[in-house]
Amino acid sequence: MFNVGLDVGDNCSSVEILDEHGKHFKHLEVKGRWPVLLEKIDKEVPKPFAICFEASCGYGHLHDRLSKLAQRVEVAHPGQLRLIFKSKKKHNRVDSQKLAKLLFLDEVPRAWVPPAEVRSWRAMIEHRQKLLRDRVCAKNQIRSLLKGLGIQAVKGLWTRNGMKWLKELELGEAEALRRDLMVGQVEGVNKMIRRVEKHLKKVSDKIPAVALLMTIPGVGIRTAETFVAYVHDIKRFAKIKRVGSYFGLVPCQDATGNINRLGHITKDGPATVRKMLTEAAWQGRRRSKTIRGFYEQVRREDPKRNKIALIATAHYLTRVMAAMLRSGECFREKEARVEEKTKAMTVPTEVGTDGGVAPLRKTPDA
């Protein structure tokens, strides 16, 4: 089987072909868009072949198209390709050669490619997050406008009555124009968010795992659908603990000899999931005795450990949600265990001559 390394570009791509022994067989420089690239690969690359390329924007579509041509398609994780991104010599041809060699040696740091419908689901979730950021930006601009004019905003500014007060506020010509544009932006984004959430609900209603995760106190439909969309198939994780590492909720580790240093969390994976899990951990701390117990256990009654305890609780929720997806069981609160800490109940005793009970003492060795 031939091994092909592909360095993909928008208008120019480099294709390196190795024979079955890992030796250079042929090199192609393709100028043109992806349809031209796919046609060139179909005509000039000998079959059967396996191909590897680095994940970038649109990698899912390219993976689906290449799967119809190649016997095996591997997508390399860009963050783990140290051989390329830490190299002092960065060139399309050199990169394609390195990808082909990694494919031949079966040392490609693989990135998982979800199905097309899951990619579409994820994109809609991320689009909602972008709309939320746009709305926050517009609201901050309105508050800045009012503060700059020395106007005290009413309580509940973003409610129906608050928006009515804002629209009827008498301002100068320029300030009124800015106010109208920003109010229109907030209302327009609200309509778009409702449309997106309506579509997301239609998708989530068809997936039982979303309803299962919503049995956790503090986990709503937005958090549940985001977790399910990015995990998709829980069986692809060998251990439940690896889900937390996948979402970047585990600390960095630098261990050598007897020294083991733990730093901040890695923040690998999608930031949207970490944000949702952190919000769910904060709500779960207030609504669930089990989650609050874990939070307080990590916090140790130290206010300086609030953030540490919150992130640890988010990691705990990740493990709980992964276990629920694997077992299919609903969330259950842990029953409180009463532990008696009286040592007298566990100390062996002996009967005295007067009928009393005395603690059993060890006799010295003869």
Image (tube, grey):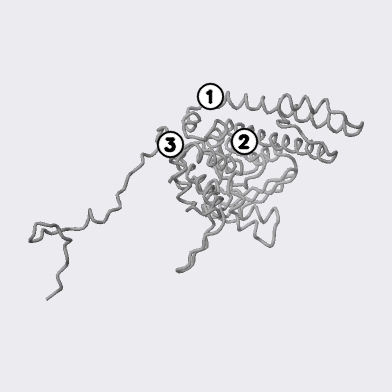
In this picture, residue 160 sits left or right of residue 24: right
Horizontal arrangement in the rendering, residue 258 relative to residue 131 (left or right): left
**SS label for mark 1:** loop
Q: Quadrant of the C terminus?
A: bottom left
Looking at numbered disc 1 in the image, what kind of residue is underneath it? Answer: Asp
Examine the rendered structure and indicate whether residue 253 appears above or below residue 148: below
Nearer to us: label 1 or label 2: 1
Q: Using the numbered discs, state the Cα–Cα distance from disc 2 to disc 3 in whole angstroms.
A: 35 Å
Which label belongs to residue 205?
A: 1
Q: Which residue is mark 3?
A: 324
Residue at which label 2 appears: 65
* Crowd rating for badge 3 (residues with CA inside 10 Å; few <14, some 14–19, many 20+): some
Residue at 61 percent across and 55 percent down: it is 98
Task: Identify the residue at image location x=64%, y=56%.
Answer: 84
Mark positioned earlier in the residue sequence (2 or 3): 2
Disc 1 and disc 2: Cα gap in Å? 30 Å
Q: Amino acid at mark 2?
A: Arg
Outermost residue on the left side: it is 353
Q: Tell me what residue is drawn at x 43 percent, y 46 percent.
A: 239
